[in-house]
Image: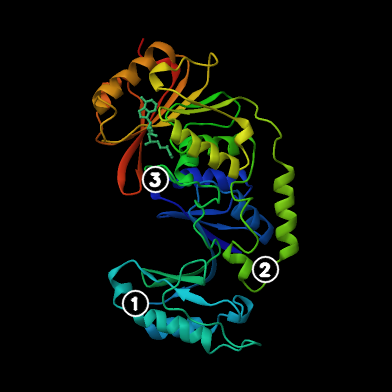
Amino acid sequence: MSWIATCPHETVKVLASELQTLGILSQTTLYRGIRFECDLEAAYRAHLSLRSASRIQKVVGNFQASNLTQFQSALKVIEWPNLLRSTKPFTIQPVLSDDQAQALGLEEVIHCVAESIQSATFEKGAPKFMEEAETEEAITLVPFFRDGNCVLGIDTAGRALHKRGWRTNGHPAVLKETLAASLLMLAGYTGEETFLDPMCGSGTIAIEAAYIALQKAPLIHRGKDDFALEHLAGFDRNLWRKVSDQLRAQKREALPAPIYASDLRADYVEVARASALRARVEKHLRFSSQAFQDWFPPTPKGLLLTNLPYGERIGGGTVQQLYREIGKVIRERFSEWRIGLLVPARGPLSELGLTRPQVIPLLNGSLAVSLLIQTPSVLTK
Ligand SMILES: C[S@@+](CC[C@H](N)C(=O)[O-])C[C@H]1O[C@@H](n2cnc3c(N)ncnc32)[C@H](O)[C@@H]1O
């Protein structure tokens, strides 16, 4: 079986290594994703376990489609009743990624797929086509065209995978859970060392850190029928339960090393605590409310990873001043720690005074950001 996991282009390598850890070695790197081959059991495990994937699709067709006639005849071969259920509506979101694909026409492509499904013989009638539907309401089909070829995928995630189900509102600048997990993996975090996020905001990075350290599958608490794949024909509920039970059983009971999360604002710490409670990791985290400037390392070594405030004025001072103070704390107190700072790509980075940090370009939504990683041996003294 062939599948596609999507993610931002910048974190494809993180996703590849996650798939590898799951034992999925047959991989092809795509722009903004990875195509992989595995059996149903490994695919179910991937749906529950991938921390950096945005969505997953099951590939149901891969064929020449340089014109609509070719496309229509290729669709005829697809056995829709083996894929879709009569009771679950579907929607179609084509991706026409080059000029040749655009020439086919969006409406025409949608029409071809809808017609092919609705003229197939379903025992209880064809599923309803919804022109505009949320991913929760309908199964989404994604015909992806490039170079006269079409890869036809069915979205099996449903809600985007960064929606883990534990987020509490109340912070204006949260990171996506998938990005937070990617930062941790890029910084080499495995859960075996002390972790600190001293500007934790809503707690996204610390909660994802707890999941990694506890070897807890990030989507394990999604409710029944929450994944789109649970609504497809051929869904194997027993196998899904078996995989979910195995993942629950592999979870650690305690953290190997402490995780600290704090923020200047006590109300944000309360938001983080509420999310951690919903994520069922609250008892593992050490929350406090204090300024970064007041932190001393709780253990001799560890990882400090944080998302610095962007652009806005901080209290009475400026971002420049804050960056200068943070740089000083890092150099003077955390010189034996590994440091990861997510900063705007055009921020006042020189104020931090780090020496040749590794710079990993990323996107936070549409904002260009960099993850700066500093290892102890190259910290300025
Ligand atoms: C960009 S937000 C972090 C968002 C967080 N990563 C999340 O996903 O929710 C930066 C945080 O830094 C906090 N902050 C600003 N100045 C601070 C300081 N001097 N010490 C500690 N926290 C500070 C802000 O209150 C804010 O919550």
- Residue at 57%, 63% (x, y): give it: 2
- Residue 47 picture quarter: bottom right
Decide: few, some or many residues near mark 3? Use Cα within 10 Å; few <14, some 14-19, many ≥20: some
Indicate the position of residue 46 as horizontal and vertical percent values.
60, 53
Q: Where is residue 259 in the image (x, y as percent from the top left)?
A: 56, 27
Residue 379 visible here: no
Q: Label 2 near label 1: C-beta < 8 Å?
A: no
Q: Which residue lies furthest to the front in this view?
A: 267
Whether residue 181 is situated above or below residue 133 in the rendered picture:
above
The correct choice, above or below, for 92 with respect to 263 in the image is: below
Q: Disc 3 versus disc 2: distance between alpha carbons?
A: 32 Å
> Looking at the image, which is closer to me, 137 or 47?
137
Label 2 environment density (alpha carbons within 10 Å; few <14, some 14–19, many ≥20): some
The kind of secondary structure element at disc 1 is: helix
Q: What residue type is labelled 2?
A: Phe
Could you tell me which quadrant the C terminus lies in?
top left
- The answer to whether any part of residue 101 appears in the image is yes
Q: Mark 1 points at which residue?
A: 106
Measured from the top left, where is residue 212 in percent x and y? 59, 37
Q: Is residue 99 left or right of residue 248?
A: left
Q: Which of 234 and 341 is in front in this view?
A: 341
> Looking at the rendered structure, which numbered label has been put on residue 233?
none
* Quadrant placement of the N terminus: bottom right
Circle 3 residue: 10
Mark 3 residue element: helix
Relative horizontal placement of residue 112, taking residue 88 as reference (left or right): left
Q: Name the residue under label 2.
A: 235
Instruction: Give the distance between the C-alpha atoms of the residues marked 1 and 3, in whole angstroms.
Output: 28 Å
